[in-house]
Image (cartoon, grey):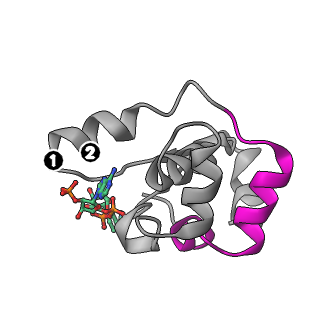
Amino acid sequence: MRPSRRLWSHRSTLLTAYSTLANSGAIDNELLAEIGRRYDKTGPQTALRWTIHHENVVTIPMSTTPAHIAENIDVFDFRLTGPEHDRIADRSTLRTVAAARLG
Ligand SMILES: NC(=O)c1ccc[n+]([C@@H]2O[C@H](COP(=O)([O-])OP(=O)(O)OC[C@H]3O[C@@H](n4cnc5c(N)ncnc54)[C@H](OP(=O)(O)O)[C@@H]3O)[C@@H](O)[C@H]2O)c1
């Protein structure tokens, strides 16, 4: 995602990160779960937090399960550290963000 973000950020354009959860492998990802436990959050919440930390990026997680919808919006009361961000990025854990397209 980095080259795309650099390209578009100075143009005041938002990127949409789609398929952030199931279709990026975030649901059962152990690294995301491990980091999330430090904040009493789940792996999917960690993935969403990582995504929305990026400037000019929004994400559109999809869910039809009320508990998941509540979980997915509950990501604004914690922040990942720089090293945690780097671990997630280095492992290419969030494939969707790496392949973000304009939505
Ligand atoms: N612009 C484009 O080109 C483009 C391309 C692909 C997708 N999209 C859009 O992006 C949105 C999301 O994409 P997506 O549906 O592919 O992927 P997604 O958001 O990564 O995954 C959705 C799946 O994750 C499950 N889920 C959601 N929250 C969860 C949680 N907290 N814990 C466990 N499971 C959870 C959902 O099941 P439950 O319903 O049971 O929660 C659903 O099966 C959709 O609206 C889609 O139309 C756009």
The CA distance from mark 1 to mark 2 is: 5 Å
Crowding at dot 2, Cα within 10 Å, few <14 / some 14-19 / many 20+, comes out as some
Residue 94 falls in image quadrant: bottom right
Q: Is mark 1 within 8 Å of ligand 1?
A: yes
Q: Which residue is mark 1?
A: 65
Residue 4 falls in image quadrant: bottom right
At label 2, which amino acid type do we have?
His
Q: Is residue 61 left or right of residue 69?
A: right
**Ligand 1's quadrant:** bottom left
User: Which of the image's four quarters has the N terminus?
Assistant: bottom right
Q: Which residue is mark 2?
A: 68
In the drawing, what numbered circle is on residue 9?
A: none
Image coordinates for residue 8, horizontal then vertical, percent: 69, 53
Which residue is rendered at x = 77% and y = 64% of the image?
A: 87
Which region shows up in magenta?
79-100
Which residue is rendered at x = 16% and y = 39% of the image?
A: 66
Q: Secondary structure at mark 1?
A: loop
Nearer to the camera, 101 or 88: 88
Crowding at dot 1, Cα within 10 Å, few <14 / some 14-19 / many 20+, comes out as few
